[in-house]
Amino acid sequence: MLAMINNIKIKDKGNIHLVFIAFIIFILCVFPSPSQADAKGSLFGFKATGQQKTVKKTETTVSVGVVNVTYLMEHAPQAEVASNELKRKFLPQEKALAASLEDIQKIEKALDRNERNLKVSQKRFRERELRSKKRTRSRSLQDFREELRFARDSALDDVQKEVFQAIDDVRKQKRIDIVLQDYVSASKRVDITSSVLEHLVKKLAKEQKLKEKNPE
């Protein structure tokens, strides 16, 4: 480039300016600025020997487990205990309602069988008695159903709390970050349902032993 410049015949002053601009462009192309050299990482085609900054990427691993809550609610021993307790509590009322229904049916049959032989006053008395028994049983049956429904819902909530607590206990034991209830498919490696059920069984056995040692 310098040789070319020396060989140029300057005919007028305008050409001098053109030659000077061409020389400046040549210098800028051959000798890049320090910032451009750092950005490219090389100077004159050679790799820079300076220390390069490296950015470390950190990755967070999240462990996931799955659990079948419906299965646990059906097979947890706490659910069986709650069911037996409900039966024990409401069995007397259920037997009383069954007995009252049987009594009503007997009166109806007797009334149908002896209708022709009964006086009008006797027939009306039996009919009033029958209606009264039906109304009483109907109110008792409604109260029984409401009480049973309330008790069943309360027992179900208690069992659900037990199951959820067991899930959290197993999660902490296995150092799992999150446990999913709703999922499409999962491998046995991440399914903790059996572990939770085992935890529930052991917990109930422990509680029963404590009750035996310290009966109320």
Image (tube, rainbow, N blue to C red):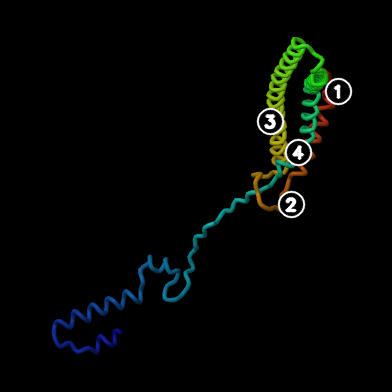
Contact? badges 3 and 2 (CB < 8 Å)? no
Image quarter hosting the N terminus: bottom left
Residue 184, image x, y percentages: 66, 52
- What residue occupies the far front of the structure in this picture? 116
- What residue occupies the far left of the structure in this picture? 12
Q: Is residue 156 visible?
A: yes
Residue at the (45%, 68%) spot, across then down: 41
Q: What label does residue 125 carry, if any?
A: none
Whole-Å distance between the Cαs marked 2 and 1? 38 Å
From the image, tell me which residue sits under label 3: 157
Q: What is the tally of numbered marks visible in this picture?
A: 4
Q: In this view, does 35 lie above or below 22?
A: above
Instruction: Looking at the picture, tell me which residue is in the foreground, 75 or 139.
Output: 139
SS at circle 4: helix
Whole-Å distance between the Cαs marked 4 and 2? 23 Å
Corner quadrant of residue 215: top right
Report the side of 180 relative to 50 (left or right).
Answer: right
SS at circle 1: helix
Which circle's residue, 1 or 4, is located before the other in the chain? 4
The amino acid type, in three-letter code, at marker 4 is Glu
Q: Can residue 89 be seen in this view?
A: no
Contact? badges 2 and 1 (CB < 8 Å)? no
SS at circle 3: helix
Q: What label does residue 212 carry, if any?
A: 1
Contact? badges 3 and 4 (CB < 8 Å)? no
From the image, tell me which residue sits under label 2: 189
Q: Which of marks 3 and 2 is in front?
A: 3
